[in-house]
Amino acid sequence: MRKRNKEANETNIDPTAWMVTFGDLLMLLLTFFVMLLSMSSMDLKMLRTVFSIFQSVGGVLEMSDKGEIAPSPEVVSEGGTAATLKEGGSGALGGGSIERKVAILEDRVEQLAYQKKGEKITNLAMLEDFFLEDSGVGRDKMRRDLESILSITEDTRGVVITLEESILFDPGEAEIKPGTYSILRLIATVISAVSNEVLIMGHTDNQPTRNKHYRSNWELSLYRALNVHRYFVQEMSIPPERLGVGGYGDLRPKYPNITPENREKNRRVEIILRKT
């Protein structure tokens, strides 16, 4: 009787039961390696975008005296300097909003920079293709984002990227705002990819400068262009022989200097991709 029970128990043992545990182990290993792979491919631009979303959200701190949630400076901007510009008002870049816009545009530009390496920009449409999707709703959204940061036009000199004073500089100053380097980096990626010679030209309105460091509007416009040139050469490694620099002061206004709005538009830096 005891022998029959022993034989019955041995018959009920499932010889494949170990595969359940083995399968669980394989699933855990797979999950672990997928996690390692995702961590190794984390995109710094995406991290900037994620943190910028939380920057403007009060959450549990909304009623506290701490203000908004500050993102990690090392993640938000290059060199550990956090962007401090806020959306709305004169000279606004939009804090987190501008970071998201630049990050999306950067992804597009960097993808095409490899495809179009050495290409020469000869018209407005060719330069727009660097920044904008080929068609559809995505292109319209990218165009709106782009136009909130810079403008692209075309004239006899070439294809012109224009940055207004409020984007790059404080009033009457020539030092570039730290929070706007991402915009210059975006433009520098395009310049590095194409073969055009480039002119960097500064402009002001006709109001006398009040900064004692610059004796005239012409001098202020020149120093602004020189600081953009310096960033392209020293930080973005663009060969200096490809770049020309100048300042027009108030001698080349785009609009008559008769209203504050027109004067604001005349204070600008132009980055010109020469056709010839």
Image (cartoon, helix red, strand yellow):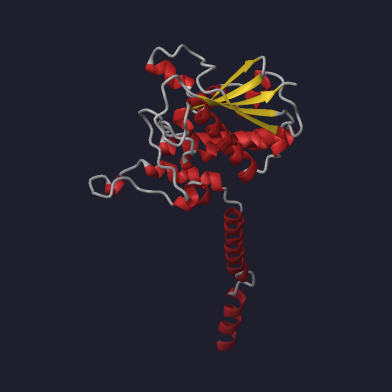
Q: Nearer the viewer, residue 84 or 262?
A: 262
- Residue at the (54%, 22%) spot, across then down: 140
Q: Nearer the viewer, residue 222 or 5?
A: 222
Quick check: 87 left or right of 62?
A: right
- On the question of residue 108 being in view, the answer is no
Q: Quadrant of the C terminus?
A: top right
* Residue 38 position within the rendered picture, expressed as x and y whole percent measured from the top left: 58, 53
Q: Nearer the viewer, residue 10 or 188?
A: 188
Q: In terms of image quadrants, where is residue 161? A: top right
Q: Quadrant of the N terminus?
A: bottom right
* Residue 145 position within the rendered picture, expressed as x and y whole percent measured from the top left: 50, 27
Q: Nearer the viewer, residue 19 or 42?
A: 42
Q: Residue furthest bottom?
A: 2
Q: How many marks can you see?
A: 0
* Residue 174 position within the rendered picture, expressed as x and y whole percent measured from the top left: 48, 35
Quick check: 137 left or right of 116?
A: left
Is the residue 70 above or below the residue 92 in the image?
below
* Residue 260 position within the rendered picture, expressed as x and y whole percent measured from the top left: 38, 18
- Residue at the (44%, 43%) spot, across then down: 83
- Residue at the (43%, 39%) spot, across then down: 96
- On the question of residue 216 being in view, the answer is yes
